Image: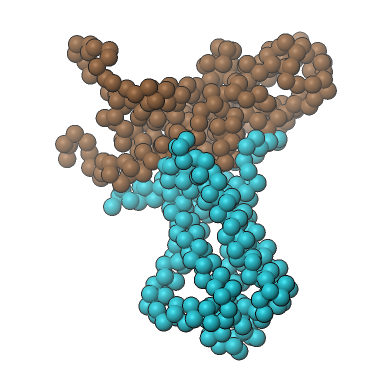
């Protein structure tokens, strides 16, 4: 089938970008979206033009690298699917396809469709960890965890950090990502000691990175390739408010330091 | 008190203030409607209620000042959050499709600002009576006659009805959404939380509208 592609081209972080139209004359329905772009790029290289830069790694929907806004929907029209797992059978002959990078102040464009998502790494660094004390390994089953908590923690832990939630949100809010990372630890006994500090620090880092604020439209949940629920955002709000009111005093240092 | 400043300035804290002030304003709207519906009990019922309210002097003024402060906070924090949201996406998408967001949720700023401008007109009309010399002449004792006189003007009645549609729309999203913001999202209660906005929003709007509609139809005269 034939497609008309409108792709965002931008030379580097500092240059101005624009939408450029390309014809994709021979697209197989069996191709993945990224394979389709590979073919387009081969054509561009053969013509001596600069190929379109896009992020990708595992191409099996688990690494969270691929990140394309396809016709105004993060990761394209199929629910619960990353761009790399989206197949061209989702499109029809003659379709026009708009392909854009994630757009957020906190995700600056590196080149073409590639954005810098290190803001997510800094949010994780602010509190997305648990303390592991050294010593003899304890018995694997001496921490009872309810089935419900284990299931919920696993649901939250599915987040691959692709950034589709930010891309889909009209406010470029990172609350679904941050809440998934806060919750998958906060739901387990191992995550309790840092639970309040984690919520405070990760939300503050998220705000500092310049992400927007959730307005509860739940577009993020609709495009999340791992279908992570917005119930984790409510959980994060609860944890944050609880930590703000009952948690550590930000004016005091931890561990008895003065 | 650095913790309080930190909380208020955070995304979650500011959203919670919008949610709590919104909830308080809904409380006022419910009370206001209950009072207004006394019009169906005849002139004595509503005029008696109005006289009782005015006899509460200090309490009434306390409630008024509180309501203005709550409304001010709601507006201030919404504007603050909105400006931050605009700043979070400096370059818009060439093409953007909504997959889930409701019409009400996408028009919150518009329905809120239009409701605010209506509230200002509403105060100028019924409370300060600058736009309505005919009801100013009635004095403060005959609320019933004030309603009949005001809503016999189709322009006043239609503006009121349109404003109540906007209020219903605003509450449709806002009233359900505030639970999520305050951390209440549980599969046991979600059916209630999701329907409280559309149901209570529509009921409140319909309740308010029933008064000008009844006057225009001649049921109340």
The residue positioned 62% from the left and 40% from the top of the image is B101
| Position of A249 relative to B155 (above/below) | above
Quadrant (top left/top right/bottom left/bottom right) for the N terminus of chain A: top right
Q: Horizontal placement of A96 versus A146: left or right?
A: right
**Percent x, y for residue A182?**
39, 31
Image colour for chain B is cyan
Chain identity for the colour brown used in the image: A
* Residue occupying the point 56% across, 37% down: A218
Residue at the image point whose x is 44% and y is 80% from the top: B52
Asked if residue B38 can be seen in this view, the reply is yes
Which of A139 and A23 lies nearest the eye of the viewer?
A139
Residue placed most toward the observer, A152 or A5: A152
The residue located at (68%, 36%) in the rendering is: B97
**Residue A11 visible in the snapshot:** no
Nearer to the camera, A13 or A254: A254
> To which quarter of the image does residue A217 belong?
top right
Residue A136: x percent and y percent?
19, 11
The quadrant where residue A121 appears: top left
């Amino acid at each position: 089938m034939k497609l008309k592609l409108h792709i965002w081209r931008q030379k580097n972080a500092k240059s101005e970008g624009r939408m450029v139209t390309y014809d994709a004359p021979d697209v197989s329905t069996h191709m993945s979206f990224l394979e389709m772009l590979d073919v387009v790029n081969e054509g561009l290289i053969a013509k001596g033009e600069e190929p379109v830069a896009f992020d990708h790694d595992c191409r099996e929907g688990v690494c969270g690298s691929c990140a394309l806004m396809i016709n105004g929907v993060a990761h394209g029209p199929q629910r619960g699917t990353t761009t790399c797992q989206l197949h061209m059978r989702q499109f029809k002959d003659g379709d026009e396809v708009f392909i854009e990078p994630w757009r957020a102040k906190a995700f600056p464009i590196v080149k073409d469709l590639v954005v810098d998502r290190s803001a997510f790494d800094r949010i994780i660094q602010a509190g997305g960890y648990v303390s592991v004390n050294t010593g003899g390994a304890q018995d694997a089953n001496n921490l009872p965890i309810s089935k419900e908590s284990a299931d919920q923690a696993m649901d939250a832990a599915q987040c691959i950090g692709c950034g589709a939630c930010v891309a889909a949100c009209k406010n470029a809010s990172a609350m679904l990502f941050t809440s998934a990372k806060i919750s998958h630890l906060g739901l387990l006994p191992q995550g309790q000691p840092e639970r309040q500090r984690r919520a405070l620090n990760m939300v503050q880092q998220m705000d500092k990175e310049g992400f927007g604020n959730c307005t509860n439209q739940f577009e993020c949940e609709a495009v999340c390739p791992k279908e992570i629920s917005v119930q984790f955002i409510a959980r994060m709000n609860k944890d944050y408010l609880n930590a703000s009111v009952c948690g550590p005093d930000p004016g005091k240092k931890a561990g008895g330091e003065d | 008190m650095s913790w309080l400043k930190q909380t208020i300035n955070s995304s979650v804290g500011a959203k919670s203030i919008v949610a709590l002030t919104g909830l308080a304003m809904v409380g006022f709207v419910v009370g206001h409607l209950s009072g207004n519906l006394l019009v169906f009990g005849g002139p004595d019922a509503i005029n008696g209620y109005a006289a009782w309210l005015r006899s509460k002097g200090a309490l009434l003024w306390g409630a008024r000042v509180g309501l203005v402060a709550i409304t001010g906070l709601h507006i201030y924090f919404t504007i603050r959050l909105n400006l931050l949201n605009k700043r979070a996406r400096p370059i818009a998408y060439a093409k953007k499709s909504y997959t889930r967001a409701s019409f009400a949720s996408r028009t919150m700023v518009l329905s809120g600002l239009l409701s605010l401008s209506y509230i200002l007109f509403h105060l100028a009309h019924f409370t300060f009576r600058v736009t309505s010399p005919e009801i100013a002449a009635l004095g403060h004792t005959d609320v019933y006659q004030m309603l009949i006189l005001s809503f016999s003007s189709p322009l006043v009645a239609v503006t009121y009805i349109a404003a109540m549609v906007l209020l219903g729309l605003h509450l449709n999203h806002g009233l359900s959404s505030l639970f999520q913001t305050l951390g209440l999202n549980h599969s046991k209660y979600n059916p209630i939380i999701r329907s409280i906005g559309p149901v209570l929003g529509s009921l409140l709007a319909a309740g308010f509208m029933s008064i000008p509609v009844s006057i225009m139809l001649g049921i109340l005269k």
